[in-house]
Image (cartoon, helix red, strand yellow):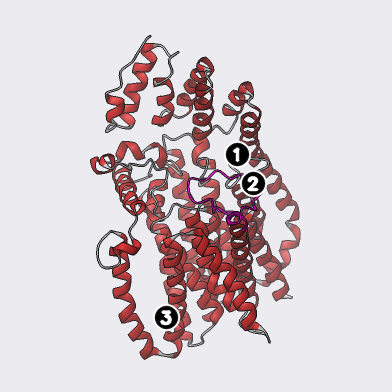
Amino acid sequence: MVEKFLRSKLNTVIYGAVATTIVTTPMFNKDSLIIPKVAILFLVALYLIPDLFINLKTFRLNSISLSLVIVCGLITIQLLLAVLNTDSPVEQVVFGRTGRGLGVITLISLLIFLLASFMYAHLENLNKIINGLLVSGILISVYALLQYFGLDFFGWVSKTNGIVSFLGNPNFVSSFIAMSFVPTIIFFRKGKYHLIVQFIFGSILLYGLFIAESTQGYINLIISCGSYLLIYLAFSKKILFKICLVFALPILVLAIIGMLNKGPLAMYLYKVSVQSRGDFWRSAVNTIDANPVFGIGPDSFGDYFLKFRDEIAVSHPWAEYADSAHNYFLEYALNGGIALSLLYFSFLIFIFRALIIFFRNKEFDPRIASLYSSLAVYYAQSIISPMNIGLMVWGSVITGALIGLSVDKLDQPRILQDARKSLNNINLTKSGLLLIGLIVIYPYFNSDRQQLIAMNSGNGDLAIKSAKMYPESTVRYFTLSKALLDSGLNVQSLDLAKSAVSFNPNSAALWSLILINPNAAMSDRMAAKIEILKLDPLNKQVRDYLFSGN
């Protein structure tokens, strides 16, 4: 009875994570890789809340559970304080920036997934998590293969090699494949023909990683396999473990300095994109230094990157604009201050503590080791990559599961019998929360859908209407106002640009649409130039910009 209960609850978590990872809506949305993921994640999290609330008293049963719920509570409070103290638009910090979707509802939903996984993942149902990773990884790889061979019937627009799968970027695709590789091999470790099955599924994943053409993917695959091997040796061959560790650490150091264009591995690992990340990181650090307590608000770095970038970043011929710090812990500090980043860092402490508990138990479990290999990839890519919902949901699920399993190893309870019985009375609450969730999410979905319809039909009136629909979006305002300007509809573009800067006066890109609009009054253009130089003080082109006409 208990196992059946836990299995059904964990199913909700895993199905939600798989759907969050792979669902896209290109027929209905412009931002079709992000909006459905935010919607599914949010709605499933709302569905899980009553279960967690009823079981809240069980978190007091042991120090690990209590500490975990306290950390999650403090993160939630810090995020809400950041929202109350930000200058960024409310819609942006709540729903996230277009193309990212990393607003408050996403970040809190991920915490709920973590806590639910902590409550319901046990050794008896651990295969469900591994199976979810396997299914997601295989589907991502298969879709990548279809794109590679020109069989994708959706016309994705990509600035990379076109291998976006369900995640939007070859780096994300390769990282997820690396995350799922070892769990997939472990899942099929038994059975009469297990070697053949392992070869088939492993080949699909490896070919998907190959066509993604991402160096990050190969490095993460090595990290994944190496992490699993080290954990195995730590349990069974301690001397060999120490020898491997001695060799692994120097190689890791060489890899890191190689990515920074130094050392013997530089020719293989260094890319201009890595140096660009240095520009992003320095701007992020400068932004955090100026806003250490509450940050600048969730998913708002795009409005501050230009203001805090340095002369080095401006001097590069490839100087890039960024709306992400390309480092999770810097991003957390941007979202809600240094305290928020430290709170998220504490999850690493939980994870390492759990690993020590597993070692003390002296019983090697390949499934647990495979999940640690996935988590190693997750944190490795988090150092140099933007946040991605498809990866983050599995980071949350695996983190919660491993912490929960460590409690089991200490023979401490995580859930009470009477709490399980009382769950029969909460269906009405769940239905109510889902209804509220749909009411919250529908405008987010619909405003983006109206933009897609407007752009496909060339309907200027609908484009203006969709841009001003709730929740307003900096990116949507810019895209549609620029499209109107490019079409010669200067008056309409100017009207939309003025609405845009009223919505988000912190965006230099929105002010630039007034600056370059020939129908704007000279006073408006001069004011726009002043605002842009406040937001992008090192922009020499704007400083030297000469007006023509009136």
| Residue placed most toward the observer, 477 or 455 | 455
Q: Is residue 411 visible?
A: no
Residue 337: in magenta span: no
Q: Residue 327's quadrant in the figure?
A: bottom left
For label 3, the SS is helix
Measured Cα–Cα span from mark 1 to mark 2? 12 Å
Q: Is residue 520 above or below residue 354?
A: above
Q: Secondary structure at mark 1?
A: loop
- At label 3, which amino acid type do we have? Leu
Q: Gap in Å between the C-alphas at discs 3 and 1? A: 44 Å
Highlighted range, magenta = 146-167
Q: Residue furthest top?
A: 550
Q: Residue at x 29, y 63 (%)?
A: 266
Prevailing secondary structure of the magenta residues: loop
Q: Which mark is residue 230?
A: 3
Q: Quadrant of residue 214?
A: bottom left
Under mark 2, the amino acid is Phe
Residue at the (50%, 38%) spot, across then down: 92
Cα separation, mark 3 vs mark 2, equals 42 Å
Image height of 189 relative to 542, above or below: below
Q: Is residue 208 left or right of residue 264?
A: right
Q: Nearer the viewer, mark 3 or mark 1?
A: 1
**Which circle's residue, 3 or 1, is located before the other in the chain?**
1
Residue wearing tag 1: 30
Q: Where does label 2 land, which residue?
A: 154
> Residue 42's spot in the image, x, y percent?
61, 50
Packing grade of label 2 (10 A; few <14, some 14-19, many >=20) is few
